Image (cartoon, rainbow, N blue to C red):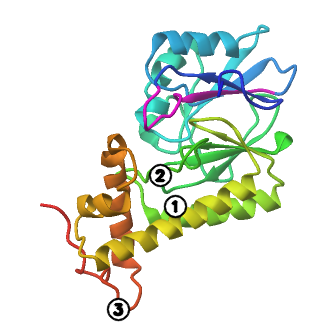
Amino acid sequence: MEIDGSGTERAYCVLAPNPSPMTLDGTNTWIIAEPGSSSVVVVDPGPDDEGHLRRALAAAQAGDRRVAQIVLTHGHDDHSGGAARFAELSGAPVAALDPAHRLGSEGLASGTVLAAAGCELRVVGTPGHSPDSVSLLLADDGALLTGDTVLGRGTTVIGQDGGLGDYLRTLDELRALADSAGLRTLLPGHGPLLGDPAGVLDYYIAHRQERLDQVRAALAAGARTPAEVVEIVYADVDRAVWPAAEVSARAQLDYLRVNPLPGSLAEPLGVQDED
């Protein structure tokens, strides 16, 4: 499906040329602006790819607009690697939850409202995929920019720096937001935009619970390490994504250590890590 140029009235996508099993079609760089605005906000410049950054800059500056602010949904390199170079090209500061990824004094916190593009973007803290993940509510379009918290295809890996407990809470909070904010569209960091946000989030929540049940069953069958869990739970998944699945399996085992079912094999010290 064609991703480049997709979006809403106030959001336009420029697709980075970094496709992979983990990034799907590539990283979506989002350009946000009220129609007729003289300034834009650029969300997730993407990897440090000069051609992509210059193409995103040209789209952002179309109609004599200026880039007022760069925002990162999180600090993983496929979203943030080009931020410093894009800031150099555009002259705009970089705002991020993690101070390590900021350029300038622009910080982010849940509830922060950005109004640099003639429309409001409200920051929603969405930890789980990574501890510094945020989503951005574009209420005028009934849209939520989700970074890697929700993908356009498939489901999200819990990163090595993330946590499943945080992610499950995030999904519940986004499901409530879908109703309270009247969301109509999800604008992910990878893959096509998604209609029916409530349905997508219901699927994500159900999928996570199903995976946990599968991991519990794998433990009951004798699995003890993340690799052993992957061999059982992800047996029908392309082996090219098994390394990423192993990261998720580790997060699932960590979660079950803290949140076991009574009498389950996932009780503390009942799960072994690899040497």
Mark before the other along the chain sequence, 1 or 3: 1
**Residue 89 x %, y %:** 54, 11
**Does residue 33 appear left or right of residue 220 in this picture?**
right
Q: Which residue is mark 2?
A: 129
Residue 2's disc is none
Q: Is residue 225 above or below residue 142?
A: below
Residue type, label 2: His
The reply to whether dot 1 and dot 2 touch (C-beta < 8 Å) is: yes
Q: Which residue is mark 3?
A: 263
Name the mark nearer the viewer: 3 or 2. Answer: 3
Answer few, some or many: residues within 10 Å of disc 3's Cα (few below 14, many 20 plus, some between 14 and 19).
Answer: few
The reply to whether dot 1 and dot 3 touch (C-beta < 8 Å) is: no
**Residue 32 x %, y %:** 73, 28
Which image quadrant: the C terminus? bottom left
Name the mark nearer the viewer: 1 or 3. Answer: 3
Q: Is residue 121 above or below residue 46?
A: below
Identify which residue is drawn at 47% across, 52% down.
129
Q: Which residue is mark 1?
A: 167
**Residue 108 x %, y %:** 59, 44
| Circle 2 SS class | loop
Q: Which of the 4 quarters of the picture holds residue 189?
A: top right
| Circle 1 SS class | helix
The reply to whether dot 3 and dot 2 touch (C-beta < 8 Å) is: no
Residue nearest the viewer, comparing 159 with 114: 159
Q: Is residue 26 magenta?
A: yes
**Most frequent secondary structure within the magenta stretch:** loop
